[in-house]
Image: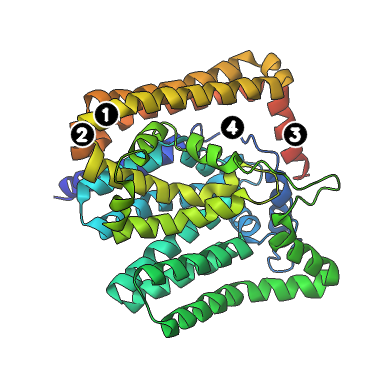
Amino acid sequence: MIIKRIKKIITKPLSIFLAFTFFVCSWPFISFPLTDGDVSNWMMASYKIQKTGVFLKAVSDQGHGPLMAWTGAIFAKLTPHSFYAYNFFNLLCGLLGVYLVYFFTYKFWQKKDLSILATYIFCTNIAVIYLTRTPMYDWPAAIMYFMFCGFYYLYVKENEKKYLIFSLIAIGVGSLSRFSICWGLAGIFMLLTSAIYRRSIKNIILDSLFITLIVGLFNFPWLISQTKIYGSSFIKTFLFDNTGRYMKSARPDAHYRKDFYGFLIYALVGMIPHTFCLIASLFQKGITKRFKDSKESMVLLAGFLPCLILFSFSGHTKLARYIAYVFPFISMLTAYFMYFYDLKSHRYRKKCRFALRSTAVLLIIILVCLVFQFNAEVKESIVFALSVIVLLFSLLGVANYTIKYRYKELLENATKYLGFYFIIYFAFFSLLSFLYKRAEFLIDVEAMIRNVMQ
């Protein structure tokens, strides 16, 4: 009886998605490679917390919230030199994201097959894999913001107080990672969702106060402690981090960057291998009517479009992780279009071919630009560069195959095709773990991070 029950649990689609994400984003566990040098910024604070046991008074990284430093100190306590341990909280956030996409998709539309499709899109796209394997501030904040939006929508729709409580806790935790971003995006989402459901001004004001109060309560002890120790220098740094950084970086030579198109490209590339599916769905006749016919789709739009637009006009350096907030919503929206309108349509699948070619051309242009921009690194490790190219086009190939030949199975149970993606990601990260100790520019990143743990 127990064995049958365990077998039933582990063969459920959600369990399969969680297992897929866990192994893909954990491999190779030992000698886990970190390839982003910015990790050293908060890892220094995390390492000091491990040594001293002091949380609230630990040094702040550029005025950013303490969540990454705190969780890094906790999970890496037993193995303080393990990169995997420092990434473990980030991994948990990725797994939470998988669960939430599955849960919210079902709560939105009451369709189990749609939940499976949305989760399949979410956990196989390259942005989610990258963000779950790279421990930075934005991914935990993004997942908590997504959690806020999902539960707040359920609160508005079903008028159950427990959903409001869940949403407020989520945005409180998220604000410990990205204070003004979580606060601001939550406020905008609340206003737009309230407009969609025509809620009263009284309810809007009350919810605004709740959001502000919970963000304040979660951050107050840390802010007070930091101010007492570091005084006006912390206040200045914190204020700039939550206001001035929108206009430009804190670097002395920084200027207002006008690459407004950058985040749109990151969003499209981040959705690989499902980018062409999204493009084909968006460029359909009657797309406006699709949104009007479903308040849920409008809620998803309210979840990611303000972020994409506002961040695009920022003068700060455009990095992919800064728009981590959009991917859960876009994954659900893509699944909604495919499930209810597109996958059964021969015209859509034909349009996917053109969208696939357009995606491939865009990708080639980006890769050529990157080769010129990082010419020295490419020459140093041609194998690494080629492996990235093979990874991207292999993913697109699998997505194209399933859309072209297995679209009925995608609608019924998309978990069947996780194996293809597992093999591709497994092979890439195996190779990366091998190259990590041999490419000079990757060795430099590791050295930079380890230097703060002395």
Q: SS of the residue at dot 2?
A: loop
Circle 2 residue: 345
Q: Residue furthest left?
A: 1
Tell me if I can see residue 10 in this picture: no
Q: Amino acid at mark 2?
A: Ser
Q: Residue furthest bottom?
A: 202
Q: Residue at x 51, y 77 (%)?
A: 208
Q: CA distance from mark 3 to mark 1?
A: 48 Å
CB atoms at circles 2 and 1 under 8 Å apart? Answer: yes
On the image, the x and y values in percent for residue 15 come to 30, 45
Circle 3 residue: 447
Q: SS of the residue at dot 1?
A: helix
- Nearer to me, 410 or 103: 410
Residue 165 against residue 377 in the figure, above or below: below
- In the picture, measured across the screen, residue 105 lies left or right of residue 429, that is left
Q: Residue at x 48, y 52 (%)?
A: 93
Give neighbour class at mark 4: few <14, some 14-19, many 20+ (Cα, 10 Å): some
Q: What colour-coding does the image apply?
A: rainbow
Disc marking residue 31: 4
* Nearest to viewer (mark 3 / mark 4): 3
Q: Residue at x 71, y 19 (%)?
A: 375
Residue 372 against residue 204 in the figure, above or below: above
Give neighbour class at mark 3: few <14, some 14-19, many 20+ (Cα, 10 Å): few
Q: CA distance from mark 3 to mark 4?
A: 14 Å
Residue 396 against residue 185 in the figure, above or below: above
Circle 1 residue: 349
- In the picture, measured across the screen, residue 424 lies left or right of residue 312, that is left
Q: CA distance from mark 2 to mark 1?
A: 6 Å
Q: Amino acid at mark 1?
A: Arg
Tell me if I can see residue 35 in this picture: yes
Q: Residue furthest front?
A: 285
